[in-house]
Every structure is written in C-alpha cells, then in structure tokens.
Amino acid sequence: MLDNIQISLTTPGLLFPAISLLLLAYTNRFFSLAALIRSLSASGKPVDNEQIKNLRQRISIIRRMQEAGVVSFAICVISMIFIYLGFFHTGSIVFGVSLLFLLYSLILSVIEIRISVDALNIHIEEFSQKQRASSEQNND
C-alpha cells in the first residue's frame, strides 16, 4: 500500500503556512484565556469551583494543542529532510505521522471550543435567570 506513495519536497512544505496559522490561533486562544483568568483574579470576586475546573481543563487542552502542533511542524520538517536526502518512502511515512499529530491537535481544538461554548451557555443561562427575576420584581 505505501510502496506506491511518493511525495515531493513541496507536499510537506504546503503544511508550513497552515501549521503556522494554526499555532498563531492557538496562541491567541491561550492569551485570551490568560487575560480572562487574570481579570477574574484581579476582580476579587469569588469564582465558582466549576468555573475554575473549566479554566484549568481549557488551559491543559490548549497546552496539548500547542504541543501537538509544534510536534507536527517538527516532524514535517524531518520528513522534508528525508525527502531531500532521497529517502522518499521514509519521508512519506514520517509525513503521515506529522499529519496524525496535526489531526490530534485539531481534535483537541474542537474539544476546547466545545468546553468554551458550554461555559458561555452557563453564563447566558445565569443572565437569563437574573433578567427573569428582575422582570418579575418589576411586575410586582
């Protein structure tokens, strides 16, 4: 099956801009989360344990996303080195491994987005409950 696969040096090279943009997006998510944590800390208001758990989980997932993206990038470079040296079969296999790390990184990204959306839905529900309570007080 893999005996027929031959990729050129440009194939792994096509991933460079994609992985770079992906890492930039992951870094932006990390900085946004760090800013949120700092603002919660500076506000002095008590933070719900579930929210702290959610933030810790998201930080951990973003770290793993970034690590998998960097590993994917590094393995992609290694595959290019193998291809450059004429080891096309080995380079193809190594490139496949790079794609698997990239896929893992993307799956983690979807998981982190889902956790983030769940947290936002909890906040929306809290706002909705406060608004209903306020409107009920105004009606009395």
Image (cartoon, rainbow, N blue to C red):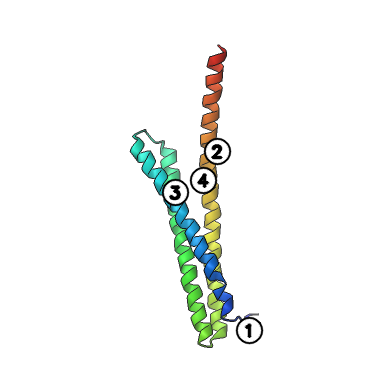
Real-space CA distance between mark 3 and mark 2, rounded to the nearest whole angstrom: 18 Å
Residue 61 in view: no
Closer to the camera in the image, 54 or 126? 126
Could you tell me residue 122's position as x and y percent? 52, 36
Real-space CA distance between mark 1 and mark 4, rounded to the nearest whole angstrom: 43 Å
* Residue at image mark 1: 3
Q: Nearer the viewer, mark 1 or mark 4?
A: 4
Real-space CA distance between mark 3 and mark 1, rounded to the nearest whole angstrom: 45 Å
Q: Secondary structure at mark 2?
A: helix
Q: Quadrant of the C terminus?
A: top right
Residue at 41%, 36% (x, y): give it.
Answer: 48
Q: Secondary structure at mark 3?
A: helix
Q: Please rate how many residues cluster around mark 2, counting C-alpha atoms within 10 Å: few if below 14, some from 14 to 19, many from 20.
A: few
> What kind of residue is marked 3?
Ser
> What kind of residue is marked 1?
Asp
Residue at 51%, 25% (x, y): give it.
Answer: 130
Q: Please rate how many residues cluster around mark 1, counting C-alpha atoms within 10 Å: few if below 14, some from 14 to 19, many from 20.
A: few
* Residue at image mark 2: 121
Could you tell me residue 135's position as x and y percent? 56, 19
Instruction: Tell me which numbered mark, 3 or 2, is placed earlier along the sequence.
Output: 3
* Residue at image mark 4: 116
* Residue at image mark 3: 32
Position of residue 94 relative to residue 52, above or below, is below
Could you tell me residue 83's position as x and y percent? 53, 83
Q: Please rate how many residues cluster around mark 4, counting C-alpha atoms within 10 Å: few if below 14, some from 14 to 19, many from 20.
A: some
Residue at 56%, 63% (x, y): give it.
Answer: 103
Q: Is residue 36 left or right of residue 117?
A: left
> What kind of residue is marked 4?
Ser
Marks 4/3 in contact by CB < 8 Å: the verdict is no
> What kind of residue is marked 2?
Asn
